[in-house]
Image (cartoon, grey):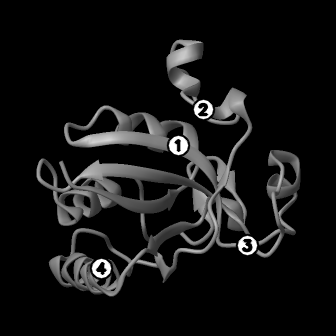
């Protein structure tokens, strides 16, 4: 088994984590915060919008079972990548769409996927997904981990 790491932000992390966790080849998916400047941020701080972090999911995957490209397909299929700082009823920079790359191959793959989506005409607007280097991933508080599993599904931030 060859384990690799991928990091994505697609709005509320509860549903994103659950979707990745239910995918064959994904070894683990963890909710947390990435892309900001505050060290060890709390959920309350991130929701305040001043830390610069996005609600993100760090995915550990077996690249012999699932490719990074397939993870990108799933990521772009699970949210609307054309809405800036918003997913459904959730809005603010913490809900932005982002691919946090861990190596230059991931960066190139993300940029290529965005170009393909834009060229396909799937969405009436251009993709606004941020493609940025993966910085420190801060694990979210324990009550956010496997949230849907613990709480029988539901909606984000209700």
Q: Is residue 52 left or right of residue 64?
A: right
Q: Which residue is mark 4?
A: 114
Residue occupying the point 22% across, 68% down? 122
- Asked whether 84 or 142 is in front, the reply is 142
**Image mark for residue 91:** none
Q: Circle 4: is it few (<14), some (14-19), or many (20+) Cα within 10 Å?
A: many
Question: On the image, numbered disc 3 is attached to which residue?
Answer: 36
Q: Quadrant of the C terminus?
A: top right
Left-right relation of 138 to 71? right
- Mark 3 or mark 2: name the one nearer the start of the chain: 3
Measured as percent of width and height from the top left, residue 63 is found at 18, 56
Residue at numbered disc 2: 145
Which residue sits at x=76%, y=72%?
52
Is residue 34 left or right of 14 when viewed as pictured? right
How far apart, in angstroms, are the residues tagged by discs 3 and 2? 20 Å
Q: Residue at x 46, y 44 (%)?
A: 16
The residue that disc 1 covers is 30
Residue 70 in percent (x, y) is at 18, 58
| Residue found 33% across the figure and 87% down from its top | 104
Callouts 1 and 2 close, C-beta under 8 Å? yes
State the separation of the CA atoms marked 1 and 2.
6 Å
Which numbered disc flags the more N-terminal residue, 3 or 4?
Answer: 3
């Amino acid at each position: 088994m060859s384990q690799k790491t991928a990091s994505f932000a697609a709005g509320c992390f509860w549903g994103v984590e659950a979707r990745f966790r239910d995918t064959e080849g994904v070894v683990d998916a963890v909710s947390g915060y990435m892309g900001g400047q505050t060290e060890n941020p709390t959920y309350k701080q991130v929701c305040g919008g001043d830390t610069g972090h996005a609600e993100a999911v760090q995915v550990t995957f077996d690249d012999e079972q699932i490719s990074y490209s397939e993870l990108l397909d799933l990521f772009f299929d699970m949210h609307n990548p054309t809405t800036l700082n918003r997913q459904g009823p959730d809005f603010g920079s913490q809900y932005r769409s982002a691919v946090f790359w861990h190596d230059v191959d991931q960066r190139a793959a993300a940029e290529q996927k965005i170009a393909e989506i834009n060229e396909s005409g799937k969405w009436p607007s251009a993709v606004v997904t941020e493609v940025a280097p993966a910085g420190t991933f801060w694990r979210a508080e324990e009550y956010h981990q496997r949230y849907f599993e613990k709480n029988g599904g539901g909606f984000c931030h209700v």
